Amino acid sequence: MEEIVLKGQLRQGSGSADARRVRGEGWTTGNLYGHGEKNVDFLVSQYELNRLVHEGHHLLHLDFGAVKDVGIMKELQFDTYGDKITHVDFVRVSLDEVIETQVEVRAIGNAKGVASGGTLDIIRHEVPVRGKARDLPEHVDLEVDGLGLGDAIRAKDVKLPAGVEILLTPEDAIIVVHAPVIEQPPAAATDVVPPVVGTEPPKPDAK
């Protein structure tokens, strides 16, 4: 596991008014808990936290000055517009602890089926895995160059470090190349005019 560090500082204030103030200064509030230890309130850079989240990092080494620990992201809270992380919760973990988490999936290469008109569909952008925290990969890279129309990469095809398992059934699809949809031409309209149902014209009077 790559050691990714998130630095911050211990939070001195409390309450919603203080939270609004620090968020206005570019901080995100957070809480670290678990393992029967005392909860820790902290502040981290909004920019730095957003960057790590977008890169798919979940398990982080935390450095808050007087407090240093390892934690896994448990919950993120966003603002009304869903653009900014306003709060983050971490759960403490030991590097030798067996945990379950989600790992980002990255498609590497260019599927040959796409050149034939197909569509590459990443069905699962993250996959659930279980293993010791120190052994978990930050992401799973899947080579898609060889995928033709109708081909798929399934859970059984994913290679993980020793001691790490994927928590999916072997046939679960992760990436699929869909064949192009061929639209059928509309049915041709017929020129048959339906008979008109009516009364026969009156016969002329006999002379």
Image (cartoon, helix red, strand yellow):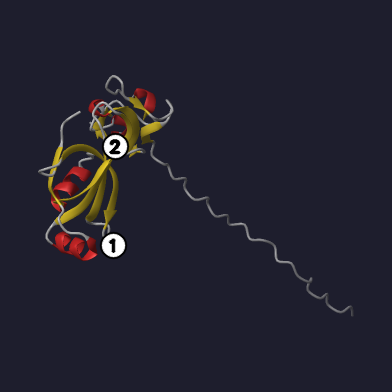
Q: Are marks 2 and 1 in contact (CB under 8 Å)?
A: no
Which secondary structure, mark 1?
loop
In the rendered image, the vertical position of residue 135 relative to residue 17, given as above or below: above
Q: Nearer the viewer, mark 2 or mark 1?
A: 2
Residue 61 visible from this viewpoint: no
| Residue 18 sits in quarter | bottom left
Q: Residue at x 28, y 31 (%)?
A: 111
Residue 156 visible from this viewpoint: yes
Residue neighbourhood size for the residue with mark 1, other residues' Cα within 10 Å, grouped as few (<14), some (14–19), many (≥20): few
* Residue 196 image position (x, y, % from top left): 70, 66
Is residue 25 found left or right of 94 in the rendered image?
Answer: left
**Of label 2 and label 1, which has the lower sequence position?**
2
Q: Residue furthest left?
A: 65
Mark sitting on residue 35: 2
* Residue 175 image position (x, y, % from top left): 34, 33
Residue neighbourhood size for the residue with mark 2, other residues' Cα within 10 Å, grouped as few (<14), some (14–19), many (≥20): few
Mark sitting on residue 190: none
User: Amino acid type of disc 2?
Assistant: His
In space, the residues marked 2 and 1 are separated at their CA atoms by 32 Å
* Residue 50 image position (x, y, % from top left): 19, 49
Which residue has dot 1 on it?
A: 80
Q: What quarter of the picture does the C terminus occupy? A: bottom right
In this view, the residue in front, 105 or 96, is: 96
Which secondary structure, mark 2?
loop
User: Amino acid type of disc 1?
Assistant: Thr
Is residue 200 found left or right of 162 in the rendered image?
Answer: right
* Residue 110 image position (x, y, % from top left): 24, 32
Q: Residue furthest right?
A: 207
